[in-house]
Each structure stands twice: as structure tokens, then as C-alpha cells.
Image (cartoon, rainbow, N blue to C red):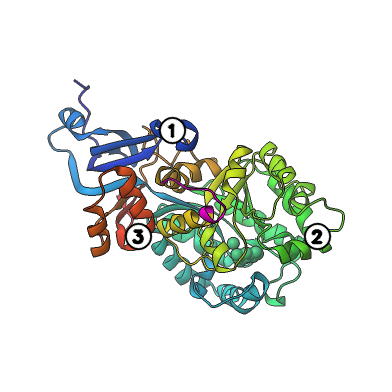
Amino acid sequence: MRTPIAPSTLLAVRGEIVHFVDDPVERGIDACVHFPDGLLLVRDGHVLDCGPAAELESSLPVDVRHIDYSGKLILPGFIDTHIHCAQTEIIASHGEQLTTWLEEYAWPAEARYADPAYAAAGTGFFCDQLLRHGTTTAMVFTTVHPACTDALFEAARVRRMRMIAGKVLMDRNCPESLRDTPAVGDAESRALIEKWHGRERLAYAVTPRFAPTSTEEQMRRAGQLFSEVPGLYLQSHLAEQRQEVTWTMCLYPGARSYLDIYERFGQLRPRSVFAHCIWLDDEDRHLMATRSAAMSFCPTSNLFLGSGLFDLGRARDFGLRVGLGSDAGAGTSLSMLQTLNEAYKVLRLAGQTLTPEAGFYLATLGGARALYLDAHIGNFLPGHEADFVVLDPRATDLLEMRMSHATTLSERLFALMMLGDDRCVAAAYVLGEPGF
Ligand code: GUN
Ligand code: ZN
């Protein structure tokens, strides 16, 4: 018999609960916690307990608020470790390779975010869409404009979402209207850090877009700033396309590799997150591992732009932290389910695999570990923030048919990650409150 729980602001959410306490690839099936008829107890926005409904019900006060999601799955809110809030407008624009896609679509889209009213509307829509897709935490590139970063943080704050974001630093090889200077970029980043970093659930990421669009002086200042303020993040792009790597190495002739550029400027440390990481060698992987930096695996974007196949197996061999990224707008979906779908296919093309457990781990606890947030989010351990997504495994006729022929949790999770998208998201809760 459990000790009775005091009422306060207690919420009991019933449904089929799945979460991860470790990486199932390392720890095996014990890493996955599954309560077919479970109860998630939330008090003051945090997880109080989680377990079989039959066991927990008896300890609840009679007047506790219940929400019944029987027949649906309850998982920790999804974590998107790499996305661009000002590219929603151009998602699914016909592109070829990275540089032309940037010039034709990304730059013009980002230029519109100079206008604070436009930025407020766009970032509000972006946050709502994240929630609609079950994503409760994201690491986000804004634009070069502080107004866009202000707008995004405010949109996340009013929705109480966890958000890591930063103003893009970019002082060369881009249109004049999107260019800052080392001094201006530095001053604007510092002002934004002062205003937003560590406020409620928000954190700032120093954001040199990628090595080719920053001068050495800007890269130096970015590394310096990153080292100065506790808890800061740094985000950038790394080794996405072969052509981009060749171009970048011409711009930094002394560097051993693309990654070595970030290393030379002090940008490779815990809490730095690099999107793509496709064209690396083992020396790079070893360096990333020793610096405790993280990779964001962005399969829909990598397939869309024809960038290449991320080597998850090799990243694992080096014990690297890896999260999942949509990279929308070059990524083709905001849905972490669709991102897992394409992650699976990328890995198959490389002769690897992604079990459904490993996939949902990546989208939840794996992402939290990549972002050094696993003490707060990523699973339902007591005390963690109560961000969760409710998935309807029968959201479409096809899923309904497929589910009626599935016998195990693994089969059902796999069907969800291959056939599911935002139609499956019945609800997304942020700190125990519905996010939409
Ligand atoms: N590299 C530099 N900027 C970008 C961007 O906006 N999208 C992608 N996919 N790669 C980039
Ligand atoms: Zn990106």
C-alpha cells in the first residue's frame, strides 16, 4: 500500500505509458519502461510518479483531477535538436544542393523576419506547429535579426515551452541585408543573453551559422562568448555536403578538417550541437567525443538536399551524444515521427538499422542527453518536468488497420514511426497543461 498523496494541484493522466530510462541499444529492453494501463501523476507541472494504474489509483485522493487517454500512448514530449524558425514558410521548396537552396529560398525567407510584427506572427505559428507535432523542446536557429530572436523567446515563454535559441551570426558570404559584423553580432548576442538566457525555461545558443558565413574574427568572438557565460549553448552546421566541405576548407586553409575550424575557435565543448555531421572522419568523431559535443541527425533534410547518409553506428562507436533534428525548412516535416521514418531509411541504406525503441529513445531521452537537459526532461522520472505527448495509434484508417494486426509494443511503435505524423498527436502537454 502506497502512502496517500496530498491533493494540491494533482493531475492523474491515464493511458498506455512508454518512456526510456536509458539507451536501449546499450542497456537492452530494460531501458524501455512500459505500462499498458498506466497512470502519470503530475503535481505543479512536474512528474510525481508514474506506474500501473491499478497500483497508483489506490493512493490518490478522491477529488483528484483525472484525464483519461485509454487506448492512446503517452510519451515524453519530443525533442527537436535542430530547426530553423524562420524557414517554415519555405518548407518543401524544390531545391537542389545546399548553397542554391540557401540563396533561392532560405535567405529571402529569413530577410522577412527583420520586421518585428512579421517575426511575432511567424514565431507564434512556429511554436504552435511544434506543439501540434508533439515537440515540446527545440534547439532553434532564428535569423540574424535580434527582433526575430526576441519574438521566438517570447512565443516560447508564453507557451511555457523549453527552448534553446540564438541569433544567427553571419558576416560574409551572404546577402548584405542578412549580414552583421563581428562587433555588432557580438553585442547583439550579449544583449539577448542578458535578456533571455536562464529565464524560465529558455536558454541561449551562440549561433555562428556555419564556418563559411563567418569571418575568423566572428568565429573567434563566438568561441570567446561561449566560454564566458555559464550554461550557454553553441549551435552550428557541420560537414553537411561534400561541396560545402571543399568550399569551407578553402576558406580556412590551415585547418585539418571542417570540425577542426570550430575546435580552433573554442567552439567545441559540452553544450555545442552540430547539425548533420555527415562528412567526418574518425579523428573528428574522436575529437567531438573528447570535447563532449553533440550531433544532430537530420535525416529528412539530408535526403531532401541529397547531402549524404549520417553514420549513427559510427557515432555510437565513439560514444557520441546524438539527438534527432527536423532541420525544417530543408527538412521536410516538423514531425519527429516522420523524422524517425526517414532516419530508419537512411540507416538501412548504410546497412544499419533503427529499432523502434532506439528511435523513440532518440526523439526523447537521447535528445535530452544531447542537450544536457536529461535532469529535467526526456522521461517520466519523478521530479522531471511534465512535458508529454499523447499519440493516437489509430489516427488514420491505415494505422487502425495496421494496429489491428500488431501484437507487440515494438510492432506498434514501429508502425507509428513509419505511418504516423501530426494526425497522431492527440495532445501535447507542457508542464502538465495542454499546449494546444
Ligand atoms: N547550412 C547553413 N545554413 C543552413 C540552413 O539554413 N539549412 C541547412 N540545411 N544547412 C545549412
Ligand atoms: Zn539547419
Q: Is residue 128 visible?
A: yes
Where 99 sits versus 248, above or below? below
- Distance, label 1 to label 2, CA atoms, is 41 Å
Q: Is residue 432 visible?
A: no
Residue to which mark 1 is pinned: 28
- What segment is highlighted magenta in the picture? 347-355
Residue 284 place in picture, x, y as percent: 72, 46
Which badge, 1 or 3, comes first in the chain's sequence? 1
Which residue type carries mark 3?
Leu
For the residues labelled 1 and 3, say whether their Cβ atoms are less than 8 Å apart. no
- Distance, label 3 to label 2, CA atoms, is 40 Å
Residue 337 place in picture, x, y as percent: 40, 56
Residue that appears at 21% across and 30% down: 56
Residue to which mark 2 is pinned: 249
Farthest residue, direction front: 351
SS state under label 1: helix
Image quarter for ligand 2 equals bottom right
- Of discs 3 and 2, which sits in the foreground? 3
Q: Is residue 120 left or right of residue 131?
A: right
